[in-house]
Image (cartoon, grey):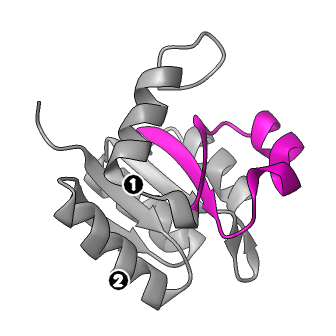
Amino acid sequence: MAALRCLIIDDNSGFLQAARALLEREGLRIVGVASTGAEALRCAAELHPDVTLVDIDLGGESGFELARRLVDDAGVDPGHLILISAHTEDDLADLIETSPALGFLAKPALSAEAIERLISSVAGGPDRPR
C-alpha cells in the first residue's frame, strides 16, 4: 500500500517540524504544512492529501471552523480530516462529534499507526465524509 499523503495544519512551527519528522519516519508522506486557515485551504486545494490533520486551536482561528470550510469548499478535497489538539478529547467531545472530521487524536498520541487505525475504523461510515 502506498504511503498516505498528509497535510498538517498547526500554528506552532515547533510542533509542525516535530510532527512532520515523526510521521515521515513512520512512513507517512507529508506533502505540506500550513499555519493559517488561508494557507490550509490553498494547500488542500493544490495538494489533494489523503489525510489532513487540523489543530483545533489555531491561535486566532478555530480549527472546527476551518474543518467545515475545508469540507464545504467545492474546490478543496482535504481527504480524511482528523482533528488534533493538546487538549483531551473529553474536553471537546461535543464539538468533535458535530464537526465534519473523521475523528480526533490527542497530540501526544499522534503516530502514523494511530492515524491509519482511525481511518480504517471509521472510514466509510454513512455520516462522515471520506
Q: Residue placed at 11% from the left, 37% from the top? A: 2
Q: Position of residue 83 (x, y in %)?
A: 61, 52
Q: Is residue 48 above or below residue 119?
A: below
Q: Is residue 124 above or below residue 58?
A: above
Give residue 24's quadrant in the image: bottom left
Whether residue 99 sits left or right of residue 128 in the image: it is right
| Closer to viewer: mark 1 or mark 2 | 2
Whether residue 10 sits left or right of residue 7 in the image: it is right
Q: Earlier in the sequence, mark 1 or mark 2?
A: 2
Whether residue 43 sits left or right of residue 68 in the image: it is left
The N terminus: image quadrant: top left
* Amino acid on which disc 1 is placed: Ala
Q: Position of residue 23 (x, y in %)?
A: 29, 62
Q: Residue placed at 61% from the left, 23% from the top? A: 128
Q: Is residue 66 magenta?
A: no
Q: Position of residue 51 (x, y in %)?
A: 38, 45
Which residue is situated farthest in the top direction here? 126
Q: Residue placed at 83% from the left, 50% from the top? A: 90
Whether residue 45 sits left or right of residue 90 in the image: it is left
Q: Is residue 86 magenta?
A: yes
Q: Is residue 98 visible?
A: yes
Q: Position of residue 91 (x, y in %)?
A: 86, 56
* Amino acid on which disc 2 is placed: Gln
Q: Element under label 1?
A: helix
Q: Residue 3 or 69: which is nearer the viewer? A: 3
Q: Residue placed at 48% from the left, 14% from the top? A: 124
* Residue where numbered disc 1 is placed: 44
Around disc 2, counting alpha carbons within 10 Å, would you say few (fewer than 14), some (14 to 19), or many (20 or more)?
A: few
Give me the disc on residue 17.
Answer: 2
Q: Which residues are magenta?
A: 79-106
Q: Element under label 2?
A: helix
